Image: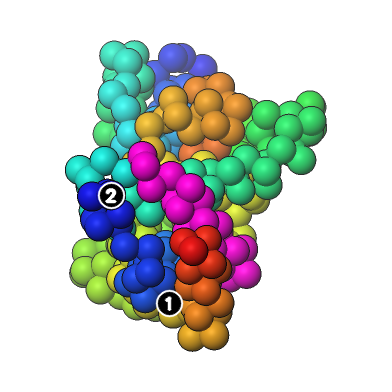
Amino acid sequence: MGIIKKIQYNCREATYLIEKRQHVRLTIKERVHLLIHLSGCSVCRLFQRQSRMINRIVKTLFRDAAGEQRRLDENVKREMQEKINERLR
Amino acid sequence: MAKIAVLDPRQWVGLHADYLYSYAVARLDDDEQAKDLVQETFLAALERTGQFMGNSSERTWLTAILKHKIIDVYRKRNSGLADRGPLGGQQQGEREPELEFFEAENGHWKEAYAPRTLGVEQADPLANKELKTILQRCLQKLPPLWFSVFTMKHMEEAATEMICEQLKLTPGNFWVIIHRAKLNLRACIQKAWM
């Protein structure tokens, strides 16, 4: 199998590079491999779209979580504040 | 005592406890442990009021302390895995998890695992509550080390070097884990969605 064919078949490498690319700059060799692969592989192009979508949703999950959706029990809070107050004395 | 005037520990619980609790629950997926960490954060903060410089808000300062405690938990959760290899319990020579998705000889997608259109990629997936719920459930199914790496990378966009140092990973291991976590998450979502 020629080198181009190998790259075209290798979805495992392509998806790895798709992940890496979302965080750091790829090397020239990596970029060439990914370009060759994606130009011929619609399944990995779909993977890339879905992967980016997942990352975007994950970010909103953590933002939502910071929106005070969860509440601590009032008794627990009272105890917490008492412990703090004790140490302030 | 100007610093104490800026920090007001008598108001901490009322002002910040729910926020810190939500922050911890999202990252630990353990209500009890999250509660304990919030309490510990307040007590640790009390010891360090002298270090508060007043150049960030009280909440930001408390959150930074909590964040360190969360990373400690990640490290403890993973320390049990350390002696089982750097990739979270994978034995040497054991089947690589990627081979669930790809053919061993050429790396091509296995037919059964190839991504399929979910039908939500074009619409606004961020507004899709059901998709969020599924993603949350799928996140919780990841092995602890993968969950830690993925969460740290995405929660504060923590630097890769910092994560590797804290969890004792090489950069190579780091990318392999990010890759595996995403393959599993995506497959889990597809399975639940279709």
Tag 1 residue: A70
Q: Tag 2: Cα neighbours inside 10 Å, few (<14), some, or many (≥20)?
A: few
Residue farthest bottom in this picture: A74
Determine the secondary structure under disc 2.
loop
Of B82 and A70, which appears nearest the observer?
A70
Amino acid tagged 2 = Met
The residue located at (52%, 56%) in the rendering is B43
Q: Can residue A14 be seen in this view?
A: no
Question: Picture quarter containing residue B4?
Answer: bottom left
The residue located at (51%, 17%) in the rendering is A1
Rendered location of residue B153, percent (x, y): 41, 42
Rendered location of residue B145, percent (x, y): 62, 43
What secondary structure prevails in the magenta region?
Answer: helix
Indicate the chain on which mark 2 is placed: B
Indicate the chain on which mark 1 is placed: A
Determine the secondary structure under disc 1.
loop
Is B104 placed left or right of B62 in the picture? right
Tag 2 residue: B1
Of B144 and B10, which appears nearest the observer?
B10
Q: Is residue B81 visible?
A: yes
Q: In this view, does B22 lie above or below B167?
A: below
Magenta part of the chain: B30-51
Amino acid tagged 1 = Arg
Labels 2 and 1 in the same subunit: no
Q: In this view, does A47 lie above or below B9?
A: above
Is A54 placed left or right of B66 in the picture? left
Is-magenta flag for residue B42?
yes
The residue located at (20%, 43%) in the rendering is B55
Q: Distance between the residues labelled 2 and 1?
A: 34 Å
Q: Tag 1: Cα neighbours inside 10 Å, few (<14), some, or many (≥20)?
A: some
The residue located at (65%, 50%) in the rendering is B143
Q: In this view, does B161 lie above or below B34?
A: above
